[in-house]
Structure formats: structure tokens, C-alpha cells
Amino acid sequence: MHHSCTRMLGPLALLAALAAPALAHAEDAYPRRPVTIIVGFAPGGATDIDTRLIAKPLAAILKQPVIVENKAGAGSNIGAEFVAHAQPDGYTLYLGSIANAINMTLYHRVNYDFNKDFAPIGLAATIPNILVVNPKLPVKSVRDYIAYAKAHPNKLTCASSGVGSSIHLSCELFKMQTHTGILHVPYRGSGPAMAGLLSGQIDSMFDNLPSSLPHVRAGQLRALAVTSMHRIASEPQVPTLAESGLPDYHVQSWFGLVAPAATPRPIIDKLNAALVQALADPGTKALYEKDGFTLPELPNTPQTFGKLMADETVQWRKVIKAAHISVN
């Protein structure tokens, strides 16, 4: 009976029948070689730091080296395009971020769709931005900052790491909600922006928390508020913008693992389980707290991360359109 069935299958069906268990075995045996995570930014920034924080525990769990490779340029679009068009075999991953959700609207031409060309794996970290001012500025609270901005229209300056960055858009969202005329000053990267703020050339910045924290602790910058829903554990004295009179203000930068869209589901699930396990490691938790990163809330699934990616793309589209920002 078995032999006659085989004859009836025909050559193509027989090949498919033989290939199916081989494919399933390949997914079961994954990973058989090193896994590469592409970062769309240069070394040293928050995206790169977080990728390196998770790569080590992921390698231990997957029992294969996890290589971090930087492909910087075009606001992280070069790295994202590379992975979107890579083999969907689980060996080339991308650490997506808020920048990719922003770039869907910010750039006129992008050769990938963040929500269609990637399979979400899971959220890796979030970080709030923090409104910091040069101590010379005569403001001690968010209310003072708003009053000062209204008393000096288009004179109060707000630095950013570049047009369309989350730092820039945090300032634009603040301007929209407070109806203030704050002058945006873009720099080429967060390092030069911070130098301008510390020297007093610039008054304020909605910076990523990890890069401002050392300066706040050293008394070189004054922290007015964080952009997250809740106060942060490491600096509990700094209020949120929501409790400072802006109940609808909530911004967090975020980072998460994605793979090319056609990556088999068993590989995605295996990577999600490895990521959740890596983030539960006490060593990872300690490093996150030291560097100002927040662990994702559970459940942290491909579905929850996919929803965040889609929701953030919509939220920033509204801000970018309202502020008439674009990059060619």
C-alpha cells in the first residue's frame, strides 16, 4: 500500500514530502552557526549599547556566538534595508528601534516597510527621554520652563541629535501640547548636542536618559522631568511630564529584535524564548539598571512587540505631519 501511494504522489509531491521533515529538522536544530544582529547606528549609542548587552546572554542560551555588526547611515535605514532583504533563516537579525517607526513617515523614500518586511521577535528595552536644562537657565520645574518659553518666544533653545530623531520629536510634541515657540537646534549626533548643552550654547534638550544621567548626577545639568509614564527607579526625585501638567505626554525610546518577514515561525518562537530568558538573567538586569535601560513588561511576545511597532508608526506619523518635518 505504501509503495503504491508513493508512485501515485508523483515526483514533485514526493520531493515536497521528503523536504518537509528536513525543513522541520533544520528549524529544530537552529542555530547551527553564529547569529548576527545588525545595528543601524554607529558604536557607542543607546541602540548599540543595548544590542551588546543582550548579545552575550543570548549567545549562552543559543549555544552559538552572537555577532553585533554596525551598518550605520540614513538614520538607521541602511541597516534595516540590509536585514529586510536578507535570507529569512534566523541568522541575520536586526535591532529595530523607535527610529524605524519614525522613518516610515520622516523619509520620502525608504526601501523597506518596518511593519511588513520584518517578523517581530520581542522587545529588548525601553528608555525614557529626560528634559534637562543648563543650570544657568533660571527654571527649576516644567511649569517654569513653559512660562520662560512663553515669555521669550523663539528664544529658548532645544538641542537634538538630528532632524527627526526621538530627541527632536519629543521637543516637537512638547511644543504642540504646550503651544510654545521653542527654537529647535539640530546637531550631528547626540555627543555634539550634549557638548552644546553643557557649554551653555543651548538651553535644553529632551535627551535619551543613559547619556544625560551622568551629567545630572554630577550637577552639570538640571533634570526637570522624564517622558515615561512612571518615575524611574534610579532617579525617583525627577517627576514625569504627565504629573507636571501634561497628562497626555508619554514618550519612550525602545529597541527590539526583528527578523526578515518570511523567517519560519518555529525560529521566531525560539528566538523570543531566548530573548525573554536573557532579559530575566540577574546579570542583564544589573547592567540595565546601571546604564539607564528599562526591562520590558511581560508578556513580551512577537504579537505584543508587533503591536508596539505599528502603534508607534501611527503616533509619530501624526507628530511629523503636524510639525511639517521631512528628510529627503
Image (cartoon, helix red, strand yellow):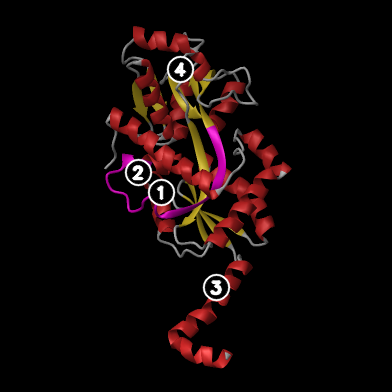
The three-letter amino acid code for the residue at tag 4 is Leu
How far apart, in angstroms, are the residues tagged by discs 1 and 3?
26 Å
Question: Which residue position is annotated with label 4?
Answer: 246
- Of the numbered discs 1 and 3, the one sitting upstream in the chain is 3
- Of the numbered discs 4 and 2, the one sitting upstream in the chain is 2
How far apart, in angstroms, are the residues tagged by discs 2 and 1?
9 Å
Disc 3 is placed on an element classified as helix
Callout 4–callout 1 Cβ contact below 8 Å: no
23 over 266 or under it: above or below: below
Label 2 crowd bin: few (<14), some (14–19), many (20+), radius 10 Å = many
Question: Which residue position is annotated with label 1?
Answer: 115
Label 4 crowd bin: few (<14), some (14–19), many (20+), radius 10 Å = some
Residue 17 on image: x %, y %: 52, 80
User: What residue range appears in magenta?
Assistant: 103-127
Disc 2 is placed on an element classified as helix
- Of the numbered discs 2 and 3, the one sitting upstream in the chain is 3
Callout 2–callout 1 Cβ contact below 8 Å: yes
Question: Which residue position is annotated with label 2?
Answer: 104
Residue 4 on image: x %, y %: 53, 92
